[in-house]
Image (cartoon, rainbow, N blue to C red):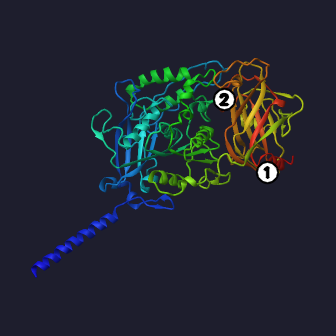
Amino acid sequence: MVLKKQINTLFAFVLIACLSLTTTAQEKAKPVFENGEAQIVKAFSDPKSWIRHDLWVETETNTDGDDQLDRVHVAVTRPQQTETEGLQLPIIYVTSPYFAGVAPDIDGIMWDVKHELGEPAPRGRVHPEVKRQGKRPIISNSHLLKWVPRGYIVVHSSSPGTGLSQGAPTLGGENESLAPKAVIDWLNGRAKGYTTPDGDETVDAYWSTGKVGMTGTSFNGTLPLAAATTGVDGLEAIIPIAPNTSYYHYYRSNGLVRSPGGYLGEDIDVLYDFIHSGDEAKRPHNNKVIRDTELVPNMDRLTGDYNTFWASRDYLNHMKPMKAALLMSHGFNDWNVMPEHSYRIYKQAEKQGIPSQIYYHQQGHGGPPPLTLMNRWFTHYLHGIDNGVENDAKAWIVRENDKNDAPTAYENFPNPKAEKVSLFLGKGGLANGSLNTTKPKRSIKETLTDNYNFSGSDLAQEESSKHRLLYTTPILKEAIHLSGEAEITIRLSSSKSAANLSVWLVSLPWNTEKKAKITENIITRGWADPQNHKSLSESAPLIPGEFYEMTFKLMPDDQIIPAGQQIGLMIFSSDSEFTILPKPGTKLTVDLQNTSLTLPIVGGESTYKKATLQ
């Protein structure tokens, strides 16, 4: 009887223990997915319970002049279950040169742009110092609330030569690609992480599945692409937002020295000074070796020509090893990092067979894809959930009156139904010439006089002006949908050996209201140097009065021009917002008979003729 009672008691204990283990196993937190998207998990959602720590990952490069390989500062934020329950999770990784602060905006930081083309600026730049900000272990709080509760670990790192990362900023140099590669290698057990910047105590990423996705905006969007071009294993997907994908395209246009919008006089050396927040003791070496020896002598503000220096800082030239799935995001009215930056990479990724989608909105700089697009992308490629994202629409375009989280799905961008329609110039450009589908039968030449004191928006609103040539379509009876890249072929002469060439595509009449939408006036823009009419890499002085022909594309766009508007082609010289500003007076003469505008119109020429009753 006693033995039976003992057995029953023991059985009860065993049963309770088993039930307890079962309950514990059932209660273990794990990612949850619905409708192909990672969901917020309550157990991952309390920031107070997150584990946060920092470390330094050793890279393959030494760029700051010492005898040691550079180490980059890394911060990790992960759910406590990765420690208490042995949970392994994929990574959302963000790297940036901005986390420790930037240089102050002081007088003289930009290049003086008021001088003749082909001549040096009348004065040098001043070089502000960055006062480093931030404390260990927190580099940044970005993306934490979005991704940690959905079952991801978020990793941040400061790029080389910024914050507590060693090395030097090189603005597109090899080390800026290899630094995030090293972090991804560390997350996969292939590189070494250390508890201090110069110690020997190592740190392992035992909580990582090795699956990494990267995202970020502007420079922070450039670096995911930089990492992807290394072909590093473990980087499964990237979502670059408004990334600079070529420093040449950021600071030059078709041979012309051109500033990014809002930063007149900026160049690659200015950006170097702006972000150089690393070790103060290493800055003199970095300034001498990187800024003063590599950047300034090779960036060539005199000619604007494309060269090996710029080619090495064009990520399109390094895409062959890339395999990470690509979701691009950009604004069609981003005149800082212009929309061509994403378009060119997206099209190359398509050619290489890389899973790719593109999201374009109608606003300016920045603007991520809707959360559902990002979530589906990362859920599939990082968690391995078969949600069919690879079969979703290739292009997501936010229409003019819609919110950014309500894009319209299209088969692709440009719209496959878009066809090239050639329009020719009719006389009267000093007031309002015409755009026609028929080429002029006789030679017509019209002349404008350069004067940067008149802005592009001012010139577009003038009924007549000697400082620009304007040619417009008939008033549209039906809306026209433009999708892709407009292109101009122009034959012109200059009264001087060098001249700026600026081209705007505008929607008229111009809406002068303060609350006018960003899509209502400027359709797209482009700039070029006539000295580069034969070659992007070799310019030659213009012979005054001699005519030259060149063809170049304007920035890609997808826009519906409503009925009642006119599409206008405006040609002028110096653009007060973007170009060097020489003394007014240079004359540009355009040969209308041999100049044409090609528009990418959905529905082609028949749609255009119907809309204009031609």
Label number found at residue 111: none
| Residue topped by disc 2 | 254
Give the secondary structure at mark 2.
Answer: loop
The quadrant in which residue 297 appears is top right
Q: Position of residue 312 (x, y in %)?
A: 53, 28
* Residue furthest left as drawn: 2
Q: What residue is drawn where x is 37% and y is 46%?
A: 76
Q: Give the quarter of the image for residue 60.
A: top left
* 87 versus 614 height, above or below: below
Q: Quadrant of the N terminus?
A: bottom left
- Front residue of 104/385: it is 385
Q: How many residues crowd around disc 1 within 10 Å: few (fewer than 14), some, or many (20 or more)? A: some
Q: Say which amino acid is labelled 2.
A: Asn
Q: Nearer the viewer, residue 35 or 120?
A: 35
Q: Mark 1 highlights which residue?
A: 563
Which residue corresponds to the image point at 41% horizontal and 40% vertical from the top-left? Answer: 157
Q: Mark 1 against mark 2, which lies toward the viewer?
A: 2
Compared with 50, 471 (above or below) is above
Q: Is residue 141 above or below residue 553?
A: below
